[in-house]
Amino acid sequence: MLNRALSGTAVRRGGFLLIAALLAACASTPKPAPALSIEAQMGALKERLFVLVEAERHRLNEGAKPLILDPELMHAAQVHSEDMAMKRSFDAMNPDGNPAVNTLLADPKFRGYVGEIAAAQYFTPGARIDPETYARGFLDIWLNSPDHRMNIAFPGFDKTGIGMAVSGNMIYAAELFATDLGLPEPP
């Protein structure tokens, strides 16, 4: 009778420990991070690309002015990226010319000198976009193009804007650089 009472207590204690262990396992299982929207991922990618391009520019040319993000250039770069994504092509093949430059020139107060770089990379829709990997990918593409590299390294640029757009399994990126060359603001 004593053995039966001990074994009943052991069973209850073992059952309690099993339930406690299961509850602890459930409580400590990490929940997956909520999926970021494609817009949020593009925002993180733009931020990382800005930092990498700025660092590379000073590595290429120690005399390069620091870049600031300019709302007008951000808008023009976004228009350009969305146009490339919609047409699935680059401005060199665009019969309407470069939408980024067209957007800037439409503003009668715009003055100065503009440089542009653009590229596209494949990605897997629905998969997380790693800002570091894709930003480095865009930078590598641009550094391997003499014209793009020259725009990155031009020391007089002091403003920039980055645009990103997605179409299918492609991310299209455009970055604009500008300087007013010290010209006075138009009346």
Image (cartoon, rainbow, N blue to C red):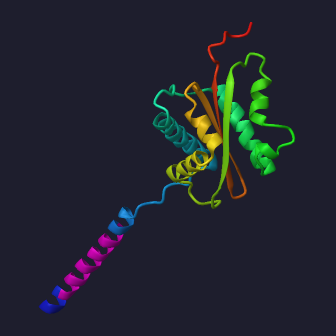
Residue reaching furthest to the top: 187
Tell me where residue 23 appears, x and y as whole percent.
35, 68
Please indicate, yes or no, whether residue 173 appears anywhere in the rendered image.
no
Residue reaching furthest to the right: 95
Foreground pick, 27 / 52: 52
The residue depicted at 68 percent of the width and 28 percent of the height is: 114
How many numbered marks, from 0 up? 0
Q: Quadrant of the C terminus?
A: top right
Tell me where residue 132 appears, x and y as whole percent.
50, 50
The residue depicted at 66 percent of the width and 29 percent of the height is: 73
Tell me where residue 59 appears, x and y as whole percent.
46, 37
Q: Main structural element of the magenta stretch: helix, strand or loop?
A: helix
Please indicate, yes or no, whether residue 49 appears anywhere in the rendered image.
yes
Residue reaching furthest to the front: 146
Q: Which picture quadrant has residue 3? A: bottom left
Residue reaching furthest to the left: 2
Q: Which picture quadrant has residue 47? A: top right
Left or right of 16? Residue 155 is right
The residue depicted at 63 percent of the width and 41 percent of the height is: 148
Q: Which picture quadrant has residue 77? A: top right
Left or right of 158? Residue 15 is left
Q: Tell me the magenta residue range.
A: 7-23
Magenta region includes residue 15? yes
Left or right of 176? Residue 25 is left
Tell me where residue 154 appears, x and y as whole percent.
58, 31
Foreground pick, 107 / 13: 107
Magenta region includes residue 108? no
Q: Quadrant of the N terminus?
A: bottom left
11 w.r.t. 122: above or below: below
